[in-house]
Image (cartoon, coloured by chain):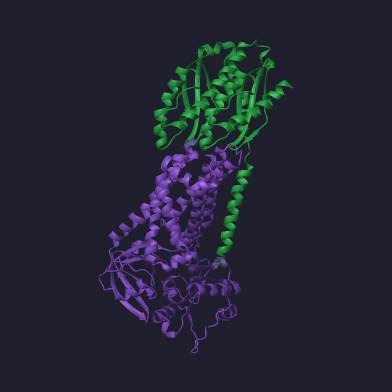
Amino acid sequence: MRKSHPLRRIVLATAATVSGVVLLLSLKPASDPASASAAAPQQPAAGQEAPQGGAQAAGATVTGDVAQTQYGAVQVRLTVSNGKITKAEAVQAPEGGTSDQKTALAVPRLNQEAVAAQSARIDAVSGATYTSNGYKQSLQSALDQVRAAADASSAPASSAPAASRTLTGKVAQTQYGAVQVRLTVSNGKITKAEAVQAPEGGTSAQKTALAVPRLNQEAVAAQSARIDAVSGATYTSNGYKQSLQSALDQAGG
Amino acid sequence: MTTTLAGGRAARRQTMRRIRPRRSPAVPLLLAVWAGALGVLGLWWHNTPSIADDNSRILNAGRITGLLAGYLMALVVLQMARVPALERRVGSDRVARWHAMSGRYTLCLVFAHIVLIMWGYALQAGRSLGDIVQQTVDSINQLPDMGKAAVGAGLFVLIGLTSIGGVRRRLPYDTWYHVHLLTYAAVFLTFWHQITTGNDFAVEPMAKTFWYGLYGAVTALVIWYRAITPVRLNLRHRMRVEAVIEETPGIVSVLIGGRKLHRMGAEAGQFFRWRFLAPGMRFSSHPYSLSAAPRPDMLRITVKAIGDHSARLRELTPGTRVWAEGPYGALTASRRSRGKVLLVAGGAGITPMRALFETLPGASGDLTLLYRANTTQDLALWDELAAIAKQRGARLMYAVNSPEGERPDISADTLQRKIPDIDRHDVFLCGPPGFAQTVFEALRGAGVPARRIHHESFEM
C-alpha cells in the first residue's frame, strides 16, 4: 500500500516504451547482413550443383531469394534441366485468412506461367498482386543464379573463378529507401547485375519487385549505366543507375 | 475449536502448526508476463532483417507497438477472467489494479500503433503526413479484416473515454460496466487483422500457432470462469434472502440461505459478487464481504448504505433469489505468518475482520481487534464482537471521535503503547482509503514490516 504516483507512473511508462522502441530500431542494421552474405556464397553453391552441366541435366534445383510482401514472404524454387526450367514451386507463400485462399489461387498459376515463359516476365494473377510480385522477384533471383551457374560451367573450369569478380556500387539514397547494385564481371563483361538493397514495404515492395528485375536485365544488356528508368519507379531507377555507375567506375578503374 | 485451546505452550504450538503462509504467485506471474513480452519483441527482431530509412523506422515502430498491444490485450482480458489463482492467491484488488494499469497502457499502444502504421503507409505511398486520414480510409478498404479492426478500434476509443478518471466518476456504475463489456467485442474484432495483415504471423507459422493458442486459452478461461462456473455454482446452491437485519442506523446485514453452502469453499475474509433478483437490482452485481464465517446453511453479508444499491438492500424481502459469484479475495488466514494477529477495521471494513476475528486460529491473547468508527453508535456488530472476544480470550478495542468531533489519535506511538509487541504481529487491515493509508503508515512507524500488513483496497 505504498503511495501511488499516477503521473510519475505515466511518465515512466511512456519514457521506457519510447526509449525501448527507439533502442530496438537503432540496433537494427541499415542493410540486411544476412542477404548480403547469403547471396555471395549462393553463387558458388549453385555452380557446385552443376559441375560442367552434368548435374543440370539430371535436374538441379535453385532457390531464389525470399521476397517480402505486405502479406508475408514468397520464395520460389526452380528445377532446371539442361538450362531449361522444368518445374517451378513456391517454398514460401503468404498464409492465414484470405491469404491462404489467394495463395492457393495464385501460386499454381504462377508456377505454370514461370515454366511456360522460362523467365520472370509473367503476368500477375489478378486479386493476388502482392503475392505475384513477390513471386516474380524471387523467381528473378533464382533465374539470376541459374544464369550465373551456366556461365560458370560454360567457362573453362580453371579460369572461371579467377576471371569473374563482383563489384558492389555505393549506396544511393532515394526517397523510399536505399538502393545498392552489385555486378558480377567476367572477362571485362557484366554477366550479372543485382540489387543488394532496394526499397521495401507496402507499395515500395511492389515497385521494387516490378523495377529491379528489369533494371538488372537492362544493365547486363547495356553494359553501362545508360539504361531507361522503369516508369512508375523513377526514384528507384535513378538510385539504381547511380549505384550502378559507381560500380562501373570501380570496374573501369 | 477455540474452547479446547486455552493458552499454554501446547496450544500455541498447535496454532503455529496450522499457520502455513502461502506465498503470493504475483512475482512469478509478472516474470512470465515480461518473458512473454520479450518473446514477442524477439519475434519482431527475428523477422526484421534491416531498417534502411525513416519510413521503415516508423513502420517498424508501428509493428512493435502493434505486437505488444496484441500480446497485452490478451492478458488484460485474462486479468478479468476471474481465474481463482488470481482472485484468491494474488488478490482481486491487486489484479483489478493490474487490469486498470495494463488496460490503459495497452490502449495507448493500440493508438500509437494505428498512427505509426498509417503514417508509415502514407509516406510509402508518397503521401505527406497530412494524408494520413485518406491513407487510413484506403487501408481499411483494401486490406483484409481492416474493416473489423476499425470498428474494434472505435469501441476501444469509447471504452477508453469512459474509463478516464473524471468521466468514470460522473457515469453511473452500470453504464460504465456495460460499455466496458464491449471490450470482448473489440478484442474479437481486432484479433483477425493481426493474423491476416501481421507480417510476423504470415512468415512464422509457429508465431501464428502461439497467437491462436494465447487468445484461445484466454477465451476458454473467460467462458469457463465467467459464465459456466457461476451458472454451476448457482444451480447447485440456490441461494435466497432469508432475512434483513438493521445493525445500526445505515448498516444492514443480509442473511442468505442455500444448499450445502460450505461446499463453495468460501473462507472468512473473502467476498462474493452479489446480484439480488429483485426489481431494479437484477442488472448489477456488487462485491460484499462475508461478515461471519460461512455456515453450511447460511451466509451473511453486512453492508453500509452508501450507494443506491446498498441502500436498496434494506428493502429486500425474504425469499428473493440471489445470484452470487465467488468466493474471491486473498485477505484470508493463509496470508498469516505469525502467531499473533492484529485486525484493524475502519467503519464498514469491519465485515471481513469480523469473520476473521471469529475464525483465525489462535490461543488466548493472540488476537487483537481494533475497530474505528465515528461514534459508539456506529460500531456495528459490537455485541457479537464482544461475545467472540470473551469466548476466545481476544482483545477488542475501539477508537471513536471525541464528543467534540475530534479524531482519535492512531499513530505509531499510541499503537506501540497499546500493543507493546506490535512489531511481532501480522496485521489485517480493512477500511476506507484514507484511513487505511494512515494506519499503514502508523504500523510501519511502529516497526511492522510491510510484508506482514495484509490489506485489500479496491481504489484504482
Task: Say which colour chain B has.
Answer: purple
Residue B75 coordinates in the image, percent (x, y)? 47, 52
Residue B331 coordinates in the image, percent (x, y)? 46, 66
Q: Nearer the viewer, residue B299 or B179?
A: B179
Residue A239 coordinates in the image, percent (x, y)? 62, 31
Asked whether residue B18 appears in the rendered view, the answer is no
Q: Nearer the viewer, residue A95 or B296?
A: A95
Task: Say which colour chain A has.
Answer: green
Asked whether residue B191 appears in the rendered view, the answer is yes
Q: Is residue B290 above or below residue B398?
A: above
| Picture quadrant where residue A168 is located | top right
| Picture quadrant where residue A116 is located | top left
* Point 43% across, 61% down: residue: B162
Q: Is residue B64 above or below residue B438?
A: above
* Point 38% across, 76% down: residue: B305
Residue B26 coordinates in the image, percent (x, y)? 51, 57
Q: Residue furthest right?
A: A253
Q: Is residue B68 above or below residue B421?
A: above
| Picture quadrant where residue B424 is located | bottom right
Q: Is residue B48 above or below residue B274?
A: above
Total count of labels:
0
The quadrant in which the N terminus of chain A is found is bottom right
Q: Residue furthest left?
A: B319
* Point 51% across, 16% down: residue: A80
The quadrant in which the C terminus of chain A is found is top right
Image side of residue B265 versus residue B410, left or right = left
